[in-house]
Image (cartoon, rainbow, N blue to C red):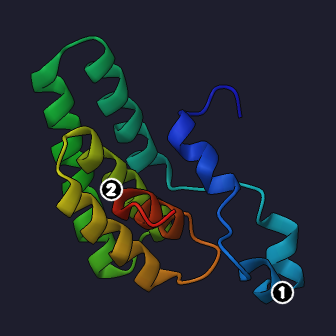
Amino acid sequence: MYCAPAILWFEMYRSVGDDVAYRDRTERKWMDWAEVDARPFMLYLQYLTFGGLRERQRQLEALQEMWDICTIHVTLGKMFHRETVVNMLGHCKEMEVHMEGALRLYNISRNYKPRNNVANLHILRLTGLQ
């Protein structure tokens, strides 16, 4: 947990309201883990790293590649943990100060997995309803 970006810590605590009550036996077993496909995660880390290094062009290139890969793979249904990937994209939109885009992505994520999805917390946080 200590080596993961802080925004992904939310992935481990993704319940809102009565979500926990709807977990089946299998979900209870793995719900405290954050899982995501390796390539989008690597690009997300590059986006964060290049931002920290103030290498804006490389940061935007990492974001664009992440967007392209995710758009193609999610559309084709070849991406696992797609709600987590879409949440990472939403976080990038937040860092780009594009809150409407972030909310749109969090809503897409919530459509993939309505319960036990940290997107619910992000939506509440961004809309000030939390």
Locate residue 77: give its quadrant: bottom left
| Residue under numbered circle 1 | 24
Give how far apart the Cα atoms at labels 2 and 1 are: 28 Å
Give how far across and how far down residue 65 sits, in percent.
20, 46
In this picture, is 55 found above or below 61?
above
Secondary structure beneath label 2 = helix
The amino acid type, in three-letter code, at marker 1 is Asp
Q: Position of residue 73 (x, y in %)?
A: 31, 69
Q: Earlier in the sequence, mark 2 or mark 1?
A: 1
Which residue is located at x 53 percent, y 81 percent? 113
Q: Which residue is mark 2?
A: 90
Label annotation for residue 73? none
Q: Examine the image and state in which quarter residue 29 appears.
A: bottom right
8 in relation to 111, above or below: above
Residue at the (19%, 62%) spot, across then down: 100
- Which residue is drawn at the image coordinates 56% and 35% (left, top)? 6
